[in-house]
Image (spheres, helix red, strand yellow):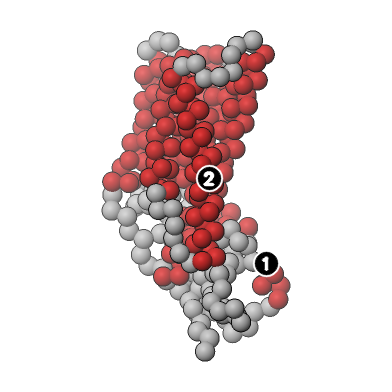
Amino acid sequence: MDLELPTSRGQLPEKSESEDDRSSTVLSSMAGDEDEDEHGPPAHAFGRSPSAVWRELRENIAPLSWYCLAAALAVCVAVAMKKGVDLLFVHVLLMTLGWVAFSSEALLVYRPFDGLNARSPNRRIQRNIHKIMLYAAGGSTLVGLAGILISRGMAGKRLFPHNWHGWMGFVTIALLLLQMEIGRRKLQHLQFQGRTSFNWHGLVGKLTYASGIASTILGLRHIFRDEMVYVWSAVVVSVVVFVVYAYLRPNKSAGYAVVDQL
């Protein structure tokens, strides 16, 4: 006997479904409906179009999202005024956006609270935004790394890490690549097997974020060699304060069907 499971909004599915709707299945997001076939209970089905995912992203932009972006851009403008616009600035711009803006948003989306960080408690929506932000952070980090390597190569400087900022950045990039792969596998296990795995992914993610922020602040010390380093470091830390506050609060994700939290 087939059972009708509620959809992601807690409603029963319609009786009929066109083939076009079935062909538009997107593996990156979850519909929450399951069917059975001759091989037994299969993997979870997914039916959220890319346009729906982007719409959910826009609808879940919180005031803290804008604050993280504004803080990152403020630091970048200060660097441009101090050092000018060159390949070093490209490195600073992309790394700061990646870690102060995108990575902070990737963490904040999992801990919504009223006011500055009001978002949907829907775990599927949170997971999709988290994934998009991590891909943005990863892309920014890799392009930013290429920028500084090219800049140092053109200046005849050594390419390997030689100070605290370089080594911390190296560790951060290694952890980021590990986290992206583990996150991909974790999502696959959840989607196709209906089970959770790699439960340490969240803890390592927080350590990766801390490493990225530390590397950012250490980098500012090489640019601002006066009291302004404290000002712009404080701007970066102010973003971290909101992230820490969000994770110290109780996490309340209620009001949706159980399948919507998978």
Q: CA separation, marks 1 and 2?
A: 25 Å
Query: What secondary structure is marked by label 1?
Result: loop
The foreground one among 132 and 81 is 132
Q: Residue at x 47, y 40 (%)?
A: 103
The residue at 56%/19% (across/down) is: 160
Q: Quadrant of the C terminus?
A: bottom left
For disc 2, the neighbor class at 10 Å (few under 14, some 14 to 19, many from 20) is some
238 to 219, vertically: above or below: below
The furthest residue to the bottom:
1
Q: In the image, what residue type sits under mark 1?
A: Ser
Using the rendered view, name the quadrant where residue 83 is placed: top right
Q: Which residue has dot 1 on it?
A: 24
| Residue farthest to the front, as pictured | 39
- Which amino acid does the dot numbered 2 rest on? Met
The residue pinned by badge 2 equals: 180
Question: Residue 157 is drawn in which quadrant?
Answer: top right
Expressed as whole percent of the image width and height from the top left, the position of residue 42 reads: 56, 73
Q: Are marks 1 and 2 in contact (CB under 8 Å)?
A: no
